[in-house]
Image (cartoon, rainbow, N blue to C red):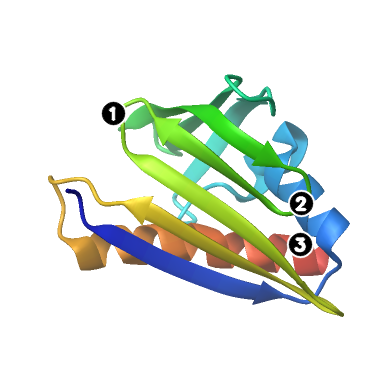
Amino acid sequence: MPSEIQISVSIASDLKKVWDYYTNPTHITAWNFADPSWHCPSAKVNLTKGGTYLARMEAKDGSFGFDFEATFDEINMYDSFTYTIADQRKVKVQFFDKKPNTEIIIVFEAETENPIEIQKQGWQSILNHFKSYVETH
């Protein structure tokens, strides 16, 4: 059984805005990268059970890039969703209304190529970037 990693963040914004910015491709391209030397030039989201998620992740210098692809397994609007990444790892994203803030908790199955701490730091960095984006837009 794969190891699970949990990350979280508290965002100074209401639940509906946080949900929209997290799931809307227009916003995803603005925050979905761990490091300023990377970007997310495109994203597509079909937020339905069996729908797909696709985000293109690239180094700004063009030296490396990949598609992050997943299929949604379950969606509970403004509460949570789960998806399966193309490599068959599972992810659960939960949204908690903590007025005036919103907390996000993400649990994902670790991959086997990189140390758990590196994976946790990368995903947490993306989530922190999301927090910053929401709170400044």
Q: CA distance from mark 3 to mark 2?
A: 10 Å
Q: What percent of the width, then of the height, locates residue 22?
A: 69, 48
Residue 105 figure quarter: bottom right
Between discs 1 and 3, the one toward the N terminus: 1
- Earlier-in-chain disc, 1 versus 2: 2
Q: 2 or 64, which is in the foreground?
A: 2
User: Where is mark 3, residue-wise?
Assistant: 134
Horizontal side of residue 119 vs 129, given as left or right: left
Figure disc tally: 3
Mark 3: which secondary structure?
Answer: helix
- Amino acid identity at mark 1: Asp
Depth-wise, is mark 1 or mark 3 nearer the camera? 1
Mark 2: give few (<14), some (14-19) or many (20+) Cα within 10 Å. some
The structure residue drawn at horizontal position 66% and vertical position 76%, both measured from the top left corner, is 10
Q: Label 1, on which residue?
A: 87
Kind of residue at badge 2: Trp
Label ID, residue 19? 2
Left or right, 62 with respect to 97, comes to: left
